[in-house]
Amino acid sequence: MLRSKKVVALFSALILSQVSLIAQNNTNSPYTRFGWGQLADPSFGAGKAMGGIGYGLRNNKQVNPLNPASYSNVDSLTFMLDIGVTAQMSRFEQGGTSTKNINGNLEYIAMQFPIHKKLAVSIGLLPVSFVGYEYGSSEKVDGSDVYATQVFNGTGGLSEVYGGISYKPF
């Protein structure tokens, strides 16, 4: 029991230290300027590999925040820590000019552990959306040799902290 409290305290400190990393630019699309930005895929590794099918998975070898019933499927001596990292390359072209951007980021962090033989907990930090854009234009001011430049940029996004508990009655 004391070990579980230490693990939760350590994980909480780890999450709080990573909040600034998750808020870093993880996309570079000018369309993220509108609304919430680019919505994140809530699946983890294996779920993403199968097209985001996490709702139906109840695997004892991975953390799955999309199916809370899967938490109690772990062995009583199992502790799982799942950290996801992403990389993205984008190329945009307009009016004969193009730009290519490469960026990456820590995407999510989650852990899952049993607190009793039939009871398990999962907590983590997941992205909801990403915002990241920078674009601009220059135009010559009428009647002069001066150019006016407009630049628009923004970064950020939304993240959620989740927690869940699962009980396996049978």
Image: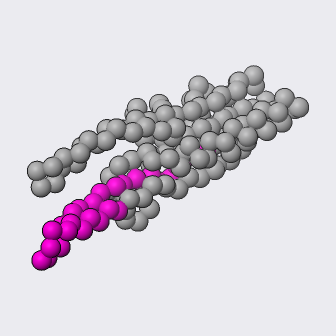
Residue at the image position 75 percent from the left and 25 percent from the top: 76
| 149 magenta-colored | yes
161 or 76, which is in the foreground? 161
Q: Tell me how many marks there are.
A: 0
140 or 27, which is in the foreground? 140
Picture quadrant where residue 115 is located: top right
Extreme-right residue of the structure: 2
Quadrant placement of the C terminus: top right
Q: Is residue 22 above or below residue 118?
A: below
Residue 166 seen in render: no
Residue 69 screen position, x and y as percent = 63, 41
Picture quadrant where residue 135 is located: bottom left
Extreme-top residue of the structure: 77
Q: Is residue 85 above or below residue 129?
A: above
| 169 magenta-colored | no
Horizontal placement of 59 versus 114: left or right?
left
Residue at the image position 42 percent from the left and 41 percent from the top: 52
- Image color mode: one colour
Picture quadrant where residue 111 is located: top right
Please tell me whether the stretch drawn in magenta is mainly helix, strand or loop: strand
77 or 147, which is in the foreground? 147
Residue 36 screen position, x and y as percent = 44, 62
Residue 102 screen position, x and y as percent = 34, 38
Residue at the image position 59 percent from the left and 52 percent from the top: 160
Residue at the image position 56 percent from the left and 52 percent from the top: 159
Extreme-front residue of the structure: 145
153 or 122, which is in the foreground? 153
* Image: magenta residue range: 125-152
Quadrant placement of the N terminus: top right
Residue 50 seen in render: yes
Horizontal placement of 152 versus 131: left or right?
left
